[in-house]
Image (tube, coloured by chain):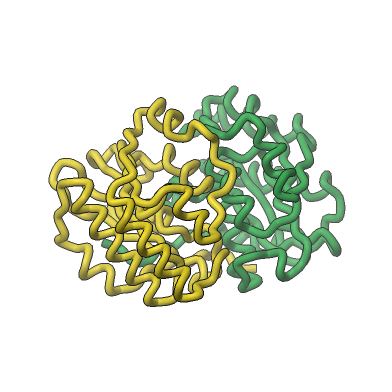
Chain colours: A yellow, B green
């Protein structure tokens, strides 16, 4: 058996994300939507997410869905962004290093929803909705119906949908491209 | 920023898990409890999980909680076991390679609960309960109240608690050792 898990995002995201400053939900969402479109062009899932510093707008980590290329069902865009942010800042609880937001191109699935409380982000903002995601055949999983209130109750502010039309358009592009649903 | 996430489990687990055969819930749980106790001795979280083949009892992957050593809030025992199993068998959906069970020393938190439907396991069995975990100060997160029915509704059989007393004893040992709660 293996004793090491390796998960990567494309090197091209490093150049995009490093030095990138986005101080509004719309600016952050535009970046994340661009990354998700790039992921469709690579024939991977149409999802991306980033972790941004809320005080200065800097991008800490850029994640895209890598389920297919990494052979790992955990490798959703949000999980990649959170793991990369934590390993970049060398801290488990991001709140120890500042005020961070997870910006994701689509409403988190059950796994990513459940992971957010452990990450130390103080806010989450999303683009496309659960309905948009499920409309193209993806499954969002068994999220609690009151997921938004549950995050807010843990002092994690939720904003969205942000730029829903633009985010959902990438999902539609993926569906038209005949992309794998998993 | 980093573009690669690396997560490992101790090499000692490889020797333990390879060739290990467990055809009953109790035999699998005993192994997982042993791994969780080893993790307490390493001053990491008191949690472990494994993926086993339900037809021949073979152990596919052994996972332990690596949140502290990997600096990553995602690295729960269940997530490590699922990711290692998928990367060992080189398949995203484990169901394509056989019938597998996720055996975990404690009831999954919100993240791990939400990840199970994407993994391809056809069953999950747990040792200690949510109450046992929260009794020593860990947070299980915002799981749906009917989590068990939600998994069963997706054709993932749930068994447990299995060997609850023995599994909870490891949690208590961790609490007595003054282990980090996160």
Residue A178 in the image: x percent, y percent? 50, 75
- The answer to whether residue A46 shows anywhere in this view is yes
Residue B71 in the image: x percent, y percent? 40, 49
Which residue does the image show at 59% across and 43% down from the upper left?
A: A142
| Quarter of the image where the C terminus of chain A is located | bottom right
Which residue does the image show at 71% across and 43% down from the upper left?
A: B33
Q: Is residue B144 above or below residue A25?
A: above
Comparing A128 with A73, the one in front is A128
Which residue does the image show at 14% across and 55% down from the upper left?
A: A21
Residue A158 in the image: x percent, y percent? 34, 36
Position of B95 with respect to B138 (left or right) is right
Answer with the quarter of the image where residue A59 lies.
Answer: bottom left
Q: Is residue A22 above or below residue B99?
A: above
| Quarter of the image where the N terminus of chain A is located | bottom right
Position of A53 with respect to B105 (left or right) is left
Q: Is residue A181 above or below residue A97?
A: below
Comparing A40 with A117, the one in front is A40
Which residue does the image show at 83% across and 55% down from the upper left?
A: B22
Position of A59 with respect to B29 (left or right) is left
Residue B55 in the image: x percent, y percent? 85, 62
Answer with the quarter of the image where residue A2 lies.
Answer: bottom right
Position of B171 with respect to A47 (left or right) is right
> How many numbered marks appear?
0
- The answer to whether residue A84 shows anywhere in this view is no
């Amino acid at each position: 058996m293996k004793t090491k898990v390796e998960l990567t995002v494309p090197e091209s995201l490093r150049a995009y994300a490093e030095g990138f400053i986005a101080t509004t939900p719309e600016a952050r969402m535009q970046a994340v939507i661009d990354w998700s479109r790039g992921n469709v062009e690579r024939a991977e899932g149409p999802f991306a997410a980033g972790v941004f510093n809320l005080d200065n707008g800097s991008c800490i980590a850029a994640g895209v869905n890598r389920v297919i290329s990494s052979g790992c069902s955990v490798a959703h865009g949000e999980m990649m962004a959170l793991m990369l942010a934590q390993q970049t800042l060398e801290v488990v609880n991001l709140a120890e290093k500042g005020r961070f937001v997870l910006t994701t191109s689509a409403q988190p699935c059950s796994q990513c929803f459940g992971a957010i409380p452990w990450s130390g982000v103080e806010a989450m903002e999303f683009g496309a909705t659960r309905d948009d995601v499920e409309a193209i055949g993806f499954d969002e999983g068994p999220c609690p119906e009151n997921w938004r209130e549950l995050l807010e109750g843990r002092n994690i502010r939720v904003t969205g949908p942000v730029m829903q039309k633009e985010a959902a358009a990438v999902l539609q592009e993926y569906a038209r491209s005949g992309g794998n649903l998993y």
